[in-house]
Image (spheres, helix red, strand yellow):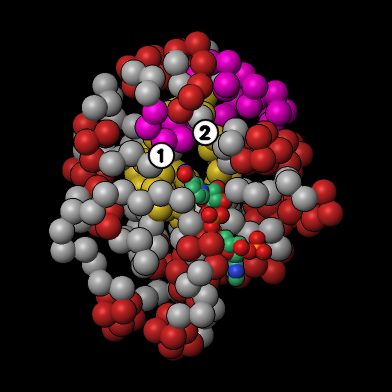
Amino acid sequence: MPKIQDVLLSNQQAVPAIGQGTWFMGENPNIRQQEIAALRHGIELGLTLIDTATMYGDGLAEQLVGEAITPVRDDVFLVDKVLPYEASYAGVISSCEGSLERLGTDYIDLLLLHWPGSHPVEETVRGFENLKDRGLIGDWGVSNFDSDELHALPASPLVNQVLYNPSRRGVEFDLLPLHSAAAPQITTMAYSPIEQGRLLADPTLRAVAEDLGASIAQLLIAWAIRDGSTIAIPKSSRVEHTAENAASAQLRLTDQHIEAINNAFPAPLYPTPLEML
Ligand code: NAP
């Protein structure tokens, strides 16, 4: 089985360029076992980075992830998120303790602030540092942070998780260059790389995908990680989709493929506010 290529984080940890999202998982009891099977199959295929959040199903996604990964906890790089309303110093700590309980584990590899809120970020980061010192998290990062919000942080986050796919390229203008230029570098984690299914009938993407002998979902994942340093976290609740997504690691886009996508989905020419889903 071919390996999924790694991305090296600035803390020198290597993680797979393709992970697994979990938004809306754990909310429908009728497909719970199917979702667990999909996550476990993904782990077997090397999609060992799993992204979840306290917000997803108000803890139900964390419970499902916990059940899925318990037998293989140490093979997984677990990413979780704290809600901005809970991001005071004490709030970050108690939110993380609640997450650990629901996940049935004693550590989270990477804890993110889900989006910027009204608690002072210095307090939030102090909470993260406390959790890190106690070994409850491996590291911390942010999500949905635009350039000015990154500049306001007291230290560089390991990761900024943002919306990124061909129909959401605004981040290419200034945010992604800022990630690369930061010291230490901030890794981009691309969420909704399949645009929640809304790009799956696009004629340009269909033509490029056919040329590659791939599906549109696979093309979108390969496009998101094409620079070798971005991580994409597609969500799939079906074993077939998960297997397809893992196989997208083998796709190599040519300049012609990139150009066809650029023509249909132009790169931004001016700053645009960060989009969120
Ligand atoms: P997404 O991954 O772009 O799309 C998910 C949809 O694509 C699901 O309907 C899934 O169907 C379908 N799909 C997956 N693989 C497919 C394939 N090979 N062929 C056809 N369809 C396929 O959307 P997302 O869930 O919004 O984003 C991914 C993850 O990013 C989330 O789950 C979450 O972990 C994270 N996220 C973070 C934020 C944030 O604010 N930080 C916001 C949004 C998302 P099935 O489920 O039926 O397989």
User: Helix, strand, or loop for circle 1?
Assistant: strand
Q: Residues within 10 Å of mark 1 (few under 14, many from 20)?
A: many
User: Which quadrant would residue 237 be assigned to in this image?
Assistant: bottom right
Q: Quadrant of the N terminus?
A: bottom right
Q: Is mark 1 within 8 Å of ligand 1?
A: yes
| 196 up-or-down from 106: above or below | below
Q: Earlier in the sequence, mark 2 or mark 1?
A: 2
| 127 up-or-down from 265: above or below | above
Q: Nearer the viewer, residue 152 or 101?
A: 152
Q: Please report the bounds of the magenta region as a residue range.
A: 92-117
User: Does the stretch in magenta take in 18?
Assistant: no
**Residue 41 appearing in the image:** no
Instruction: Look at label 1 and name its amino acid.
Output: Ser
Residue 143: mark in rendering: 1
> Residue farthest to the left?
270
Which residue carries the number 2 mark? 81
Horizontal side, residue 263 vs residue 93: left or right: left
Q: Nearer the viewer, residue 23 or 240?
A: 23
Q: Is mark 2 within 8 Å of ligand 1?
A: yes
Q: Position of residue 116 (x, y in %)?
A: 37, 32
User: Helix, strand, or loop for circle 2?
Assistant: strand
Q: How much space separates mark 2 and mark 1, taking CA atoms?
A: 8 Å
Determine the quadrant in which ligand 1 lies.
bottom right
Instruction: Look at label 2 and name its amino acid.
Output: Lys
Q: Position of residue 99 (x, y in %)?
A: 63, 26
